[in-house]
Image (cartoon, rainbow, N blue to C red):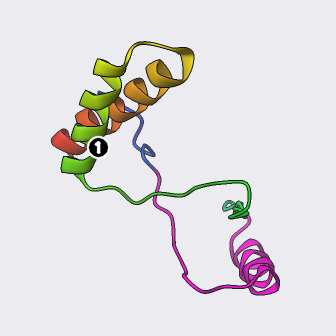
Amino acid sequence: MNDDPDFPYWGIDIPGLRKGQAVEVAELIQQSDAEIVPTLVDPKLWLTLHLDRETVEVMRDALMSAGQTIVTTSLIESFDEWLDWSADA
C-alpha cells in the first residue's frame, strides 16, 4: 500500500470543453491557488479512462495472462497499486 496521503490525488473531469475553455479553466485554477498546477490533457494524445474496481481487476487479470512486456508489467503494477490503495481507503 502507498502511504503517501496525497495518493491518489483527486482530479476533475469536465466533459464537453473545447481547448480554449480548458485553457481558461486551468488559468483560473492557477490564479486561485498557487499550490495547484493543472495539467491539460489533449484527447488526441491521451486516453483518459475512469474505471471501476471490477473493470480494473478484469483488465489486470487479462494482462497477467497475456504475457509480460514492459508495458503490461507497468500497467499491472499501476492497477495493483490502485487496487491496494482503494481497498484500504
Q: Quadrant of residue 34?
A: bottom right
The structure residue drawn at horizontal position 51% and vertical position 71%, both measured from the top left corner, is 12
Residue 49, above or below 57: below
Residue 64, above or below 25: above
Q: Nearer the viewer, residue 25 or 18?
A: 18
Q: Nearer the viewer, residue 16 or 25?
A: 16
Q: Nearer the viewer, residue 41 or 36?
A: 41
Residues in magenta, as a range? 9-34
Magenta span contains residue 62: no
What number of labels is visible?
1
- Which amino acid type is shown beneath numbered disc 1? Val
The structure residue drawn at horizontal position 73% and vertical position 79%, both measured from the top left corner, is 22
The structure residue drawn at horizontal position 18% and vertical position 48%, both measured from the top left corner, is 54
Expressed as whole percent of the image width and height from the top left, the position of residue 15 reads: 54, 82
Horizontal arrangement in the rendering, residue 81 relative to residue 29 (left or right) = left
Horizontal arrangement in the rendering, residue 56 relative to residue 9 (left or right) = left
The structure residue drawn at horizontal position 82% and vertical position 84%, both measured from the top left corner, is 20
Horizontal arrangement in the rendering, residue 37 relative to residue 89 (left or right) = right
Q: Which residue is mark 1?
A: 56
Expressed as whole percent of the image width and height from the top left, the position of residue 25 reads: 71, 82
Magenta span contains residue 12: yes
Expressed as whole percent of the image width and height from the top left, the position of residue 68 reads: 43, 12
Residue 32, above or below 57: below
Furthest toward the front, the residue is: 66
Q: Nearer the viewer, residue 79 or 59?
A: 59
Q: Quadrant of residue 43?
A: bottom right
Mark 1 packing: few (<14 Cα in 10 Å), some, or many (20+)? some
Quarter holding the N terminus? top left
Where disc 1 sits, the SS reads helix
